[in-house]
Each structure stands twice: as C-alpha cells, then as structure tokens.
Image (cartoon, helix red, strand yellow):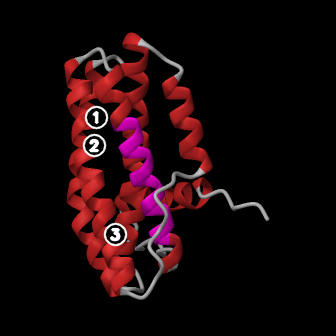
Amino acid sequence: MSRPRLLPPIAGLLAAACMAGAGWAQTPIPPPANDFAMMSAQSDAYEIQAGRDAAVQGVDPRIRSFGEQMVADHTRSSEALRQAAVASGLPPPPDAMGPDQARMLSALQSLRGPDFDRAYAKQQALAHHQALAVQQSYAAAGGDPNLRRAAQQAVPMIQQHLQMAEQLRSALGGS
C-alpha cells in the first residue's frame, strides 16, 4: 500500500490561506487530527535535517546560524506536537519526513557553496509558507483541543522563521 502524497493538501491549504489573506472571510478547513499531526511532524523532520545540513554546509554565517536555530526550534515544536498527540490519545507521529520533503532535502544535499545557501533559503521560505498555512488552519478550527493549542503556539515561531527565510533569500539573491 503506497502512502498518499501530502504536498497537494498542503498546497490547497496554502492557496486557501492566501485567499483568506486577500479579503476572503473563509477559514481553510483544517485536516483531521491524525493528518495534521503527520504533516506537522514531517515538516519538523525536514526542518531539523535541513537545518543540520545548513549548520555544517552553509558558507554564509547567516545560513549556518539560521540552520542551528531551525534545529533547536523545530526540535522543541516536534516535542510539543508529540506531547499533544499523546495527551489526546493519538499515537505519537513518527520522526520522518514525507516523500516531498525527502526530495527537497536530497536536492539540497547535492549542492555546495553559495548554491547550497541560496537553495536552502529558497526552500526555507517555501517550507515555512506551507507550514504556516497548515498550522494556522488547525489553530483556528482544528478538531482536537490539544493539537489546536500546539498549533497556536507554533504559529508565531513559524511566522518569525518565514520572515527570516524571506530576508535570507532576498539577501542571497534567491528568487
């Protein structure tokens, strides 16, 4: 049995969040609790591994520092998610990224020098846009109160990461 791709639902939530920001009064429909926990865990797993790579392979000290911060912050959010899932009687989500994140990481790991830095900054902006859409939808209307609280706590961190990633992308000449 193959696992469903999770990027299309994330992309749909992102599109819905963008429409909401453009004046639509509609909140995106959050995913079911198990799907939310899985998507969040996959996002954290990608952020942690990509951050480790950036801390080692980054040429620009801002990339290395950002990578270290991603490891620390997403390790904490991953633990908060795990605790929320367990408190709700759900199985703890596995510490594994999805196939789309694995492909992004593989592409990143094939690069060196300034190319690595630019690709990392670009991927971080994309990944945090997607993560923010998922977290905001669940924080606003998620069905599980423990996971909703975890999402509400994650939103400001992800917003800060997104802003930092966008600044890095702009500073490094990424499009």
Q: Residue 107: percent from the left, percent from the top? A: 56, 28
The kind of residue on which mark 1 rests is: Gly
| Quarter occupied by residue 110 | top right
Q: What stretch is highlighted in magenta?
A: 36-51
Determine the CA span between mark 2 and mark 3. Answer: 16 Å
Circle 3 is placed at which residue position? 81
Question: Quarter of the image containing the N terminus?
Answer: bottom right
The span from disc 3 to disc 1 (Cα, nearest Å) is 21 Å
* Image x and y of residue 47, in percent: 38, 45
Dot label at residue 67: 1
Q: Could you tell me which secondary element the residue under label 1 belongs to? A: helix
Q: Measure the alpha-carbon separation of dots 1 and 2.
A: 5 Å
Amino acid tagged 3: Leu
Please give the residue where the numbered disc 2 appears in the rendered image. 70
The residue under the point 24% across, 58% down is 76
91 on left or right of 146: right
Above or below — where is 25 with respect to 39?
below
